[in-house]
Image (spheres, rainbow, N blue to C red):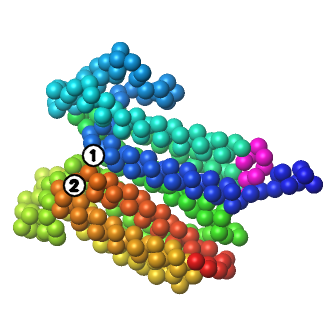
Amino acid sequence: MPHARFSRPRPRAYGAWLLVVAAMVLAIVVVGGITRLTESGLSITEWKPVRGIVPPLNDAQWQEEFAGYKAIPQYRAFNTSMTLDGFKHIYFWEYLHRLLARLIGLTLAAVLAVFWWKKWIPRGYGWRTVLILGLGGLQGAIGWWMVASGLEQRTEVSHIRLAVHLMAAMLIYAVLIWTALDLRTARQPARLRLAPLLAILMLAVQLALGALTAGLRAGYAFATWPRMGDAWLPAGAWAHGQSALFNLTSNPVVVQFVHRWWAWAAAAAALWLAAHAARAGAVTRAGALLALVAIQIGLGIATLLSGVALPLAVAHQAVGALLLGAMVAAAHGVGAALHGRTFTS
């Protein structure tokens, strides 16, 4: 009997730990936003998955790291007057970003190992955690692929690779939340229905547009709203000699324009999902989703009008991630209702 108690699955505890990891992913998204906005992402020019845990500890090590930064185009183009203290400031944010990535991987691996060893993982959920762990490893490779794009010829990282990096993080975040909710609130896994999935994908497009806007510094193009200067779309903004794909992904004015107005389509999808979640009994989740939509719209407009002030821009990215989490939770509520789940909050 003691052995039976020892090996009994603990779905709620396992789900709680996955939510902790999801919170860590949210934290790294916020730090990643700060890293991008402070132009800190290229301060560490090597990928050292193990040795990179230890930061420079003396002046000689700091000078070595600074020398690596001096060798890349960004320094030669913009920062030749940077002091060692200035370098330490941008190094801090990139180091913190990479440290959090390592902590997320280690935490998830440790949770998986302990729960597997003690046979606490409910049937069917071990493979999900292994999948998430694999996605985390892939995300590390994507992160270095992104950084490498700015080390030889470019003076910044590729905005396309930046968007891929953010969306990979958001995928991990969403899968963690969905799995945790399956473990904590449903008698059996909820079904992700097509309509809620489409609503989430509409928000995903908006998040990707936000990453492109940040990567292209497109938010600085026009600090007015709802018009861009004196027009809805400035004359000549569309580059007719380029493809539609180029304009939609690499033309800063067009990217900002689409990001502004696709926001309303994503908001409408979120409101629709909130209504369906409320009808399914997930009233608290629906209410949280409605509140986050309103906050995010306000932050987006305020960020533009402020000329992309750092606190507002970071808050805008953080609430975007929270909004995704709320949409995943609402979609889960709709899917869980198919199994007769009753929500009391």
Q: Are marks 1 and 2 in contact (CB under 8 Å)?
A: yes
- State whether residue 107 is above or below residue 150: below
Where is residue 284? Give x, y as percent: 52, 76
- State whether residue 305 is above or below residue 71: below
Q: Amino acid under label 2?
A: Val
Q: Nearer the viewer, residue 59 or 275?
A: 59
Identify the residue at image location x=7%, y=59%: 236
Which image quarter holds the C terminus?
bottom right
How far separated are the C-alphas under marks 1 and 2?
9 Å
Instruction: From the viewer's perspective, tell me whether residue 202 is left or right of residue 249.
Output: right
Identify the residue at image location x=36%, y=76%: 268
Circle on res. 37: 1
Where is residue 207? Give x, y as percent: 36, 59
Predominant SS of the magenta segment: loop
Circle on res. 308: 2
Instruction: From the viewer's perspective, tell me whether residue 250 is left or right of residue 34.
Output: left
Q: Amino acid under label 1?
A: Leu
Magenta highlight on residue 297: no
The single residue placed furthest to the bottom in the displayed view is: 279
Q: Which segment did they paint magenta?
A: 115-123
Where is residue 302? Give x, y as percent: 23, 64
